[in-house]
Image (cartoon, grey):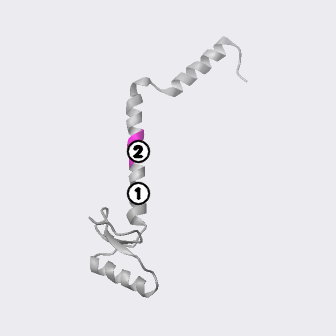
């Protein structure tokens, strides 16, 4: 419970307002927050789309991997060129016509 004294209330109000910071840099703080959020999102997408997958140096190498997987019973794999590392990865999603 807070104090009912005017001086205590004034101190609490002043401390609260000081903790808010100035309104001068609201837009700057928001831009920085969005920039940080965008960087974290891009890193998460890159991790999921590239860094967590096996990378193959050439299309020939990835096609050999697809054939080896097919020999072991895994069918329906396709390859695609990675926009992040310029290597090749495998996917089970249907192949897109580009």
Left or right position of 61 against 3: left
Are there few (<14), some (14-19), or many (20+) residues within 10 Å of tag 2? few
- The question of residue 37 being in magenta is answered with yes
- The mark closer to the camera, 2 or 1, is 1
Quadrant hosting residue 77: bottom left
Q: From this viewpoint, which residue is outermost toward the bottom? A: 71
The quadrant holding residue 74 is bottom left
Q: From the viewer's perspective, tell me whether residue 45 is left or right of residue 19.
A: left
Q: Position of residue 42 (x, y in %)?
A: 38, 53
Does residue 48 belong to the magenta stretch?
no
Circle on res. 45: 1
Answer above or below: position of 66 versus 27: below
Image quarter where the C terminus lies is: bottom left
> Which residues fall within the magenta stretch?
33-38
Query: How far apart are labels 2 and 1 at the CA level?
Result: 14 Å
The mark found on residue 36 in the picture is 2
Of mark 2 and mark 1, the one earlier in the sequence is: 2
Q: Residue at x 42, y 50 (%)?
A: 40
Residue 92: x percent and y percent?
42, 71
- Mainly helix, strand or loop, the magenta region? helix
């Amino acid at each position: 419970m807070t104090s009912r004294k005017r001086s205590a209330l004034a101190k609490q109000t002043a401390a609260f307002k000081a903790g808010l910071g100035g309104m001068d840099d609201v837009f700057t703080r928001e831009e920085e927050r969005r920039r940080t959020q965008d960087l974290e999102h891009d890193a998460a997408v890159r991790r999921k789309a590239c860094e967590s997958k096996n990378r193959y140096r050439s299309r020939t190498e990835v096609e050999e991997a697809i054939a080896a997987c097919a020999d072991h019973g895994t069918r329906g794999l396709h390859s695609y060129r990675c926009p992040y590392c310029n290597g090749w990865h495998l996917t089970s999603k249907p192949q897109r016509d580009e």
